[in-house]
Image (cartoon, grey):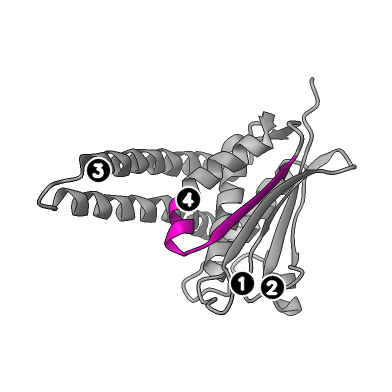
């Protein structure tokens, strides 16, 4: 029960925080001498989208709690990536993060639960943004890529240019309740690994070539039943 409660608090926090941010923006646009109704409309649309996402997160967590497994269908992983990047666009701009994408899955379908894979990818992106928050001496750059691997899987990677990881920390990052954040619960990466493993893939982290860290996960290709 403690792990489930921590999981819900962790996963629902991001869409709720986004709802608060967008509602504050809408109020500012309304409080102007000449209210910007187009911006208010966009903010309300984002609030609606984030509210729906919070509901989808809860559905996914309930499925994990019941151990019913993901609802697997054939998905275009590059389409999933594009949807998640659209959700994360505001946060990337707010933190002055340069986004690079390298999508080379060749249109092949993967076997996945759209909501759960979106959860994993969005939170890996947000973790990368958080890791770069204190970087001032170089460009904050986030690279999200997909690649068709030879072993019948698609490899998805999220690479940041943050301070990187100590080897001892990297080994413990996927342990429940281990966190490097002052306000972290330490459940996120443990949940994401469980989700990816339930898909028949794996999730791991390694140091990036120059700066930062790179999280990678695999998802099997879709096979017609």
Q: Which residue matches tag 3?
A: 40
Q: Which residue matches tag 1?
A: 162
Mark 2 falls on what kind of element?
Answer: loop
Q: Position of residue 135 (x, y in %)?
A: 55, 76
> Is disc 2 surrounded by few (<14), some (14 to 19) or many (20+) residues within 10 Å?
some
Q: Which residue matches tag 2?
A: 211
Which mark sits nearer the N-terminus, 1 or 2?
A: 1
Span colored in magenta: 89-104
Disc 3/disc 2 C-alpha distance (Å)? 39 Å
Above or below for 160 versus 8: below
* Callout 4 touching callout 3 (CB < 8 Å): no
Using the image, tell me which numbered label, if any, was put on residue 89: 4
Above or below for 167 versus 118: below
* Callout 1 touching callout 2 (CB < 8 Å): yes
Q: For the point 15% across and 46% down, which residue is it?
A: 35
| For residue 33, side relative to residue 188 (left or right) | left
Disc 1/disc 2 C-alpha distance (Å)? 6 Å
């Amino acid at each position: 029960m403690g792990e489930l409660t921590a999981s819900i608090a962790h996963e629902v926090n991001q869409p709720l925080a986004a709802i608060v941010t967008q509602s504050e923006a809408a109020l500012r646009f309304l409080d102007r001498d000449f209210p910007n109704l187009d911006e208010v409309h966009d903010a309300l649309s984002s609030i609606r989208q984030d509210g729906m996402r919070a509901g989808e997160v809860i559905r996914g967590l309930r499925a994990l709690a019941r151990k019913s497994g993901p609802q697997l269908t054939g998905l275009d992983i590059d389409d999933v990536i594009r949807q998640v990047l659209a959700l994360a666009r505001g946060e990337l701009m707010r933190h002055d993060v340069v986004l690079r994408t390298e999508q080379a899955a060749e249109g092949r379908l993967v076997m996945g639960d759209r909501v759960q894979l979106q959860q994993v990818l969005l939170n890996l992106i947000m973790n990368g943004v958080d890791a770069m928050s204190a970087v001032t001496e170089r460009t904050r750059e986030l690279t999200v890529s997909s690649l068709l691997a030879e072993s019948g899987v698609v490899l998805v990677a999220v690479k940041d240019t943050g301070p990187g990881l100590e080897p001892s920390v990297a080994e413990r990052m996927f342990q429940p309740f281990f966190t490097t954040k002052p306000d972290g619960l330490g459940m996120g990466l443990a949940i994401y690994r469980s989700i990816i493993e339930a898909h028949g893939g794996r999730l791991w982290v390694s140091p990036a070539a120059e700066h930062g860290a790179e999280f990678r996960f695999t998802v099997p290709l879709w096979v017609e039943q």
